[in-house]
């Protein structure tokens, strides 16, 4: 990618706007956009509670034999959103922001940060509810209709184009081929979201915070976890790992450095490609 951008600067001297447009589309395409894995995907383990999908990755030089990582960041716009964007731009890497509708109204700064997220081609926005359950998860999931309404409200207020969603406080999956609920009392609400057309995506690996709400542990430890998940085949879809952390943990220098190093090291191994969540296998097979 660095080479592409060096190339871009040289080309622009000669080709002006044409080069700019080409480079922009290179940037977007390199970061995913919906790739057609569907035809070659197959379910390999029907008796497994999570039916494993083994997609044959596209035979381009980027995807061959590489693992796919989906970097996702929850609860924005929030403290740390600007720092997150700086890291992504520095590393020229794409990610998905699961946005809380209410957070974009909480302050002018958050309103501004939402615009930054929306206008950045590296970022895809997805739905993380309007209210974030007011952080009272048990009560929230007791009322499935209200849960769907809350996600609809976020979709409308954020003007989201599709219905990819993540449930607040719960690692829940509702895709055609993946049905997982971490806390069973939330299952009915999740089913209703799916019936309403939402594609609910949880995560395979979370970088958690300390009690001071900064990133816990080192990037080396997280890199080992990534390897361990792939090695032990613990990801929901073979060769595809959804990574989660939160914008708000990126407000101190150490956390910012650690996330930056984590991404840098992942990129340097040359074993991974990075995509936005809409490129997750089968996610676009449902609905519309
Ligand atoms: Zn959240």
Image: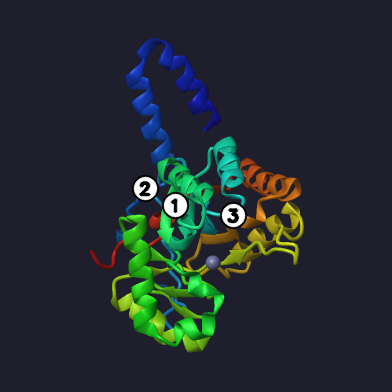
| Residue 33 tag number | 2
Sequence-wise, the earlier of marks 1 and 3 is 3
Disc 3: which residue: 247
Compared to 126, does 112 lie above or below? above
Along the line of sight, which residue is nearer the eye, 44 or 229? 229
Q: Closer to us: mark 1 or mark 3?
A: 3
Badge 1: few (under 14), some or many (20 or more) residues near its Cα, within 10 Å? Answer: many
The local secondary structure at tag 1 comes to loop
Q: Is residue 250 left or right of residue 200?
A: right
Front in this rendered view, residue 97 or 219: 97
Q: Earlier in the sequence, mark 2 or mark 1?
A: 2
- Per the model, the C-alpha gap separating discs 3 and 2 is 23 Å
Residue 41 seen by the camera: no
Which residue occupies 35% across, 76% down? 148
Asked which secondary structure carries label 3, the reply is helix
Picture disc at residue 276: 1
Q: Which mark is residue 43?
A: none
* Label 2 secondary element: loop
Estimate the spatial distance between the alpha carbons at disc 2 and disc 1, rounded to whole Å. Answer: 7 Å
């Amino acid at each position: 990618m660095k080479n592409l951008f060096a190339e871009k600067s040289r080309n622009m001297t000669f080709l002006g706007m044409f080069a700019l447009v080409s480079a922009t589309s290179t940037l977007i395409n390199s970061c995913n956009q919906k790739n057609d894995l569907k035809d070659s995907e197959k379910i390999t383990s029907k008796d497994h509670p999570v039916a494993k999908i083994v997609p044959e990755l596209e035979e381009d030089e980027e995807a061959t034999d590489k693992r796919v990582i989906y970097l996702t960041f929850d609860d924005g716009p929030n403290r740390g959103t600007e720092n997150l964007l700086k890291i992504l731009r520095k590393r020229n890497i794409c990610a998905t922001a699961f946005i809380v509708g209410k957070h974009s109204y909480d302050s002018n700064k958050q309103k501004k940060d939402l615009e930054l997220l929306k206008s950045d081609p590296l970022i895809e926005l997805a739905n993380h509810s309007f209210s974030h359950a007011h952080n009272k998860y048990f009560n929230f999931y007791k009322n499935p209709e209200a849960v769907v309404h809350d996600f609809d409200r976020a979709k409308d207020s954020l003007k989201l184009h599709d219905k990819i969603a993540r449930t607040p406080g719960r690692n829940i999956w509702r895709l055609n081929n993946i049905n997982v609920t971490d806390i069973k009392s939330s299952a009915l609400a999740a089913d209703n979201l799916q019936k309403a057309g939402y594609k609910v995506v949880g995560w395979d690996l979370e970088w958690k915070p300390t009690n001071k709400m900064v990133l816990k542990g080192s990037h080396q430890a997280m890199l080992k976890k990534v390897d361990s998940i792939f090695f032990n085949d613990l990801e929901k879809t073979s060769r595809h790992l959804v990574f989660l952390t939160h914008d708000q943990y990126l407000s101190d220098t150490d956390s910012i450095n650690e996330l930056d190093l984590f991404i840098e090291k992942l990129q340097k191994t040359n074993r991974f490609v990075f995509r936005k969540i809409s490129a997750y296998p089968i996610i676009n097979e449902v609905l519309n």
